[in-house]
Image (cartoon, rainbow, N blue to C red):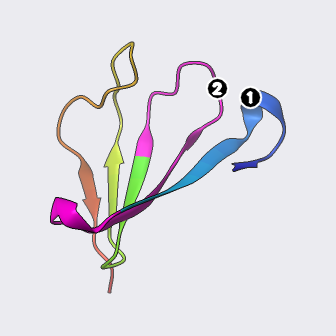
Amino acid sequence: MQIGRGKSGVKIGEYGNEHDGGGTLGWIEPACDNPQWIMWFTSKGDGLLYTKRDEKGGIIGDPIRIKSR
């Protein structure tokens, strides 16, 4: 799903992989041609923000972890 128009919006998706250990539920990323960040959400309410991606869209480096309360 996309929120906003064209390349100025963001894409939101469901993933639902409860078997990855973190219980990843979904993600959000910019709707541009070459998004440089992506945020994953876990079933615990935490967020994992990756700020750098390669040319194929794969993540690079360690995430910034955002803990839920």
Q: Is residue 54 above or below residue 48?
A: above
Q: Which residue occupies 34% across, 28% down?
A: 52
Q: Is residue 39 left or right of residue 13?
A: left
Category of crowding for the residue at label 1, using alpha-carbon neighbours closer than 10 angstroms: few (below 14), some (14–19), many (at least 20): few
Residue 23 among magenta residues: yes
Residue 21: x %, y % from top left: 15, 65
Residue 44: x %, y % from top left: 30, 79
Q: Which residue occupies 81% across, 31% down?
A: 6
- Find numbered disc 1 in the image and state the secondary structure of the residue it sits on: helix
Can you name the residue that lies furthest to the right here? 5
**Amino acid at dot 2:** Cys
User: Which quarter of the image is occupied by the C terminus?
Assistant: bottom left
Earlier in the chain: of badge 1 and badge 2, it is 1
* Label placed on residue 50: none
Q: How many marks?
A: 2
Q: Is residue 13 above or below residue 41?
A: above
Report which residue position mark 2 lands on. 32
Q: Name the image quarter holding residue 24.
A: bottom left
- Residues under numbered marks 1 and 2 in contact, where contact means CB atoms less than 8 Å apart: yes
Can you name the residue that lies furthest to the top here? 55
Q: Is residue 24 above or below residue 50?
A: below
Q: Which residue occupies 28% across, 73% down?
A: 67
Residue 51: x %, y % from top left: 36, 36
Q: Is residue 8 above or below residue 4?
A: above
Q: Which residue occupies 32% across, 70% down?
A: 46
Residue 20: x %, y % from top left: 19, 59
**Amino acid at dot 1:** Lys
Report which residue position mark 1 lands on. 7
- Find numbered disc 2 in the image and state the secondary structure of the residue it sits on: loop
Q: Is residue 19 left or right of residue 25?
A: left
Per the rendered image, the range of residues in magenta is 17-38
Q: CA distance from mark 1 to mark 2?
A: 5 Å
